[in-house]
Amino acid sequence: MRRDRVGIDGFNLALPHGTGVATYGHALSEALRGLGRSIDVIYGLDVSRAAPEALRETLFFDRLAQRRTEAAGRTTLGQAMRRAFLSPSVREPREVTISGRVVREGAPRLPVFDRLFTLGGLYPLAARHFRRYGRFLTVRLPDPPAIMHWTYPLPLRLEGALNLYTVHDLVPLRLPFTTLDDKVYHDRLLRECLARGDHIVTVSEASRRDILDFFPVDPARVTNTYQAALSPGAEADGGSLTARLRALFDLKPEGYFLFVGAIEPKKNVGRLIEAYLAAELETPLVLVGPRAWLADDELKLLEGAHGMRLPGAGRIRRIDYLPTDHLRTLMRGARAVVFPSLYEGFGLPVLEAMTLGAPVMTSAAGAPAEVVGDAGCLVDPYDVPGMTRALRRLDGDDALRTGLREAGGQRATAFSMSAYRRRLWALHARLLDEPPLISPRGEHFGDIA
């Protein structure tokens, strides 16, 4: 076991278009590298065991670029037989050596890593194993890391490591009407993570309180590390931002409101659209995010109400998916980012908006309010008239937006990469029984709660 080595999973990192948890995984790997840690990443992509070692790199990037979940696609006869005769034996992912021979320009982004491992179908296999045996599937790596950060509740454990499970939120249990999850399975999985994991990590005090309210767990075993936004990249000056917005979206700086997130009940898009239409604003509303469960219900006001298309619906634009740099351009130029979600474990879009200098409107309760503090316009997510008033204020009050930009930028520093590294260093030091003194970067990390 290497005490300076940490593992993370590649479950969400391999999903199509990425997810908020994938962003969390990238930020975690970046923070761990800043702490001087060696990093192992375990993917579940199918790199044929019959393939020569020299071909693994090519096959890995081929599978990664297919941008589909592991469970998608045809099931081979061999896979069907392995499922039928599922064994509880230990699984050993194969190492993929990244030589640089494969051109990575345009390939899906990898997290920071030192060693890369993969085993085809690992994550659905683990779920089937848990359903059948009620136990986590064991994974074995050569010279394993001291700590394994599972970035999601996954029914896996790494042999020879301290296994940490990140529980981002309790949405399936707190808002069961907003998800299609198997609630019985999810509850069993969380209870097993809490019982068998060496520690539980979460991303806000709101989520930590929910975990302690729902489950009989020692509070000392649940740590909120928050999370950090990834580096926003080079700031665009006024001229280039104006040009990019015009060329890519036919929009002007501060000329639109922006929502970012999946179109689903939890994100509260239906009430946001209702509030926007009631506000009768000329400033467009741009919705960026894929259609998810019950999206039709959330978007029904856009597609006609009472047998007619509402006049203001034409000022609402939908974009299904954007690459990260395009999304950041939209955030930088927004009049305000509006995110009145019903429930979030953290609320990454509000942190990203503050980091990029956009005013924020978000929910007054739960994790988003915790992240924003006094630096945003807070609304009751169930109060449509209240949201309407907030949109009108944000649209018409230049001084309010300027103040929120300044306050948001200051507030975002509490969730900087440096602050995130300090919280991770303190957690690792406690778990490994090491003094939280000075990191390899020379940063003083003592006396951290």
Image: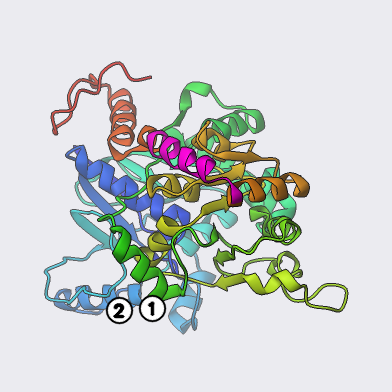
Q: Examine the image and state in which quarter residue 1 appears.
A: top left
- Taking the image as shown, residue 420 lies to the left or right of residue 180, namely left
Front-lying residue, 330 or 340: 330
Cβ–Cβ under 8 Å for marks 2 and 1 = yes
Position in image of residue 392 (x %, y %): 66, 50
Q: Identify the residue at image location x=28%, y=58%.
A: 237
Q: Determine which residue is flagged by label 2.
A: 62
Position in image of residue 431 (x %, y %): 33, 27
> Looking at the rendering, in which quadrant would you find the C terminus?
top left
Front-lying residue, 283 or 100: 283
> Would you place residue 436 above or below residue 340 in this image?
above
Q: CA distance from mark 2 to mark 1?
A: 7 Å
Q: Which mark is residue 338?
A: none
For residue 139, say whether it is visible: no
Q: How packed is label 1: few (under 14 Cα within 10 Å), some, or many (20 or more)?
A: few
Instruction: Identify residue type, mark 2.
Output: Asp
Which residue range is magenta in the image? 396-411
Q: Examine the image and state in which quarter residue 228 appears.
A: top left
Position in image of residue 182 (x %, y %): 67, 56
Q: Determine which residue is flagged by label 1.
A: 66
